[in-house]
Image (cartoon, grey):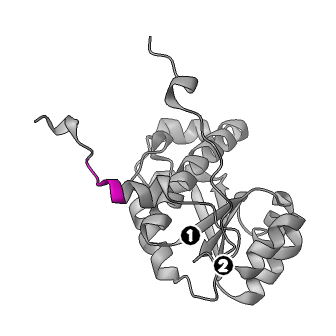
Amino acid sequence: MSSHDTAVVTDDALAVLFTNAHTARSFRDEPAPVEQVRRAYDNARWAPTALNSQPLRLDLLASPESRQRLVPLMAGMNQDSVLSAPLALIVSADIALEKSMRALGAPEEMLQRLAGSMEMRQGLARDSALIQLGYLVLALRAEGLDVGVMTGADLPGIDAEFHADRPWQTIAVVCVGHGDESAFHPRSPRHDFDDVSQVL
């Protein structure tokens, strides 16, 4: 049997990451240890980004006081999620990524191009940070955590509140924890492969 005839991971593992996982909207009074987020990041960081740019940045709001600072900046429908979550992540893109890319061994020519173009830096940083956000969601699920990704927020306001001293631009807020009995809506439909693809 060819190695391509079977999945590399088990169906149970795929269910944890994809088919059985739901967006969590409310959470049990149970901790979401920062160490689990660290492990999730340590796994997700190996997945590819453009030019190995690795622009994802995280604020881990582990204290109730820090989450209270965030709540007024969230859309009304998302405020309760932040209040109930034991941990909220502000997920951002580092717009000065040419500086951190030097430590990752990026070619000097590319670093100079990035340094000379804010548009290029913003595009590269945002696109790759969004890709990394997807990786991180799956890695958090692999840790046994439920997550809820939200973009309904005053993102510039979050930057002003939390990033005044650094070139990070918020792209999303992720609530992390263990969903309670009312956390999950019924599964919504998804497109079938044949509806979204063409083989040429």
Q: Nearer the viewer, residue 69 or 21?
A: 21
Magenta span has 33? Answer: no
Amino acid residing under circle 1: Asp
Residue 53 visible to an observer of this rendering: yes
Whether 69 is drawn above or below 131: the answer is below
Q: Nearer the viewer, residue 116 or 37?
A: 37
| Helix, strand or loop status at disc 1 | strand
Whether 84 is drawn above or below 162: the answer is below
Where does label 2 land, which residue? 27
Q: Nearer the viewer, residue 127 or 76?
A: 76
For this orientation, the residue located farthest to the front is: 186
Residue 45 visible to an observer of this rendering: no
The C terminus - image quarter: top left
Residue in the picture at 54% in, 32% down: 192
Do callouts 1 and 2 mark residues in contact (Cβ within 8 Å)?
yes
Query: Main SS type for the magenta part?
Result: loop
| Helix, strand or loop status at disc 2 | loop
Q: Which residues are magenta?
A: 8-12
Q: Position of residue 146 (x, y in %)?
A: 56, 69
Residue in the picture at 65% in, 65% down: 184
Whether 119 is drawn above or below 168: the answer is above
Q: Position of residue 85 (x, y in %)?
A: 68, 79
Q: Position of residue 49 (x, y in %)?
A: 48, 44
The mark that comes first in sequence, 1 or 2, is: 2
Q: What is the C-alpha distance between the residues marked 1 and 2?
A: 9 Å
Label 1 Cα crowd, 10 Å radius (few <14 / some 14-19 / many 20+): many
- Quarter location, residue 190: top right
Where does label 1 land, which residue? 146
